[in-house]
Image (cartoon, helix red, strand yellow):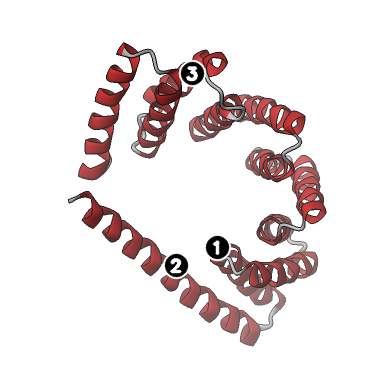
Amino acid sequence: FGTKSEHADKFFLEKAFELSGKIDDANTQVLILNELGKINAITDRVEDAFQNYEAVLKLKDLVNQPGVEADALFNLAGLYVKKGEYNKAITYYKKSLGIWRSFGNRAQEARLLNEIGSVYERMENVERALANYTAALEVYQGVDQKKGIAESYNNIGALYYQQKKTQQAVENLELALSAGHTSQTKDPVRKSYEYLSLCFKELGNYQKALEYKDLFIAMNDFIQKEESDQKLLEVQNRY
């Protein structure tokens, strides 16, 4: 139920929240509540996380942070996904989407569309999942955000793979890989390698399947080492 570091963080954040309440500092309260929500969500204290993010919504009118409400709604949607309450998750994601659209924040709009697509995919509503992934792709292309373009093509490609439309999956995954390389971001590239390996295995091209599998393993090992090194650095910086 969480590392010692997470428990320590939670303890100090709760104390800081008590202090911020005494000095009536809503901006600090929101910051702390969001961090507490993240820790509670990671450590599967879902109901505590719900309380944290709902408390943020109650403070939204007292802070000068335009994205506070949208972020809280986004985080609540993620909790509903964890609970398997997908219709509620979509409702909250759409509320967050509406706020970001009103601000003209295209990158956040695309991010929400991808999240909504992923929930529809969990619900096995392929048509709506594909529609949202495609809409996200078009927004990312409009602002020329290569990482988002790669993620969206990956989502579409993986969806086609699950539907046994392997050639369409390959076409989208190759576009994802190209955008991922251009953006120099590792996670989208890793996913492209993984699904291209699966697709070529399905197509009977075992040589290409093995090549992409080897690339996937190498990238996965590299990312895991980076994450491990980052966690070690964070622990060292605490003491």
Frontmost residue, 162 versus 89: 89
Question: Whole-Å distance between the Cαs marked 2 and 1?
Answer: 8 Å
Q: Are marks 2 and 1 in contact (CB under 8 Å)?
A: yes
Q: Residue shown at 72%/76% (left/top)?
A: 203
Dot 2 crowding, Cα within 10 Å, few <14, some 14–19, many 20+: some
> Which dot marks residue 146?
none
Residue 29 at x, y percent in the picture: 40, 22
Q: CA distance from mark 1 to mark 3?
A: 31 Å
Q: Which residue is mark 2?
A: 223
Q: Residue furthest bottom?
A: 207
Q: Earlier in the sequence, mark 2 or mark 3?
A: 3
Who's the residue at 44% across and 18% down the image?
26
For the residue marked with disc 2, what is the amino acid?
A: Ile
- Residue at image location 55% in from the left, 67% down from the top: 186
Q: Which residue is mark 1?
A: 187
Name which residue type carries label 1: Asp
Neighbours of disc 3 within 10 Å: few (<14), some (14-19), many (20+)? some
Among the two numbered marks 2 and 1 on one chain, the one whose residue lies closer to the N terminus: 1
Residue at figure coordinates x 22%, y 37% from the top left: 8
- Is 116 displayed left or right of 239 in the figure? right
The single residue placed furthest to the left in the displayed view is 239
Residue of label 3: 54
Give the CA distance from mark 2 to mark 3: 34 Å
| Image position, residue 207 (x, y; %) | 62, 87
Residue 227: horizontal and vertical position, in percent? 38, 61
SS at mark 2 in the image: helix
Quarter of the N terminus within the rendering: top left
The numbered mark, 1 or 3, whose residue comes first in the sequence reads 3
In terms of image quadrants, where is residue 222? bottom left
Mark 1 nearby-residue class (10 Å; few <14, some 14–19, many ≥20): some
- Left or right, 137 with respect to 122, comes to right
Q: Are marks 1 and 3 in contact (CB under 8 Å)?
A: no
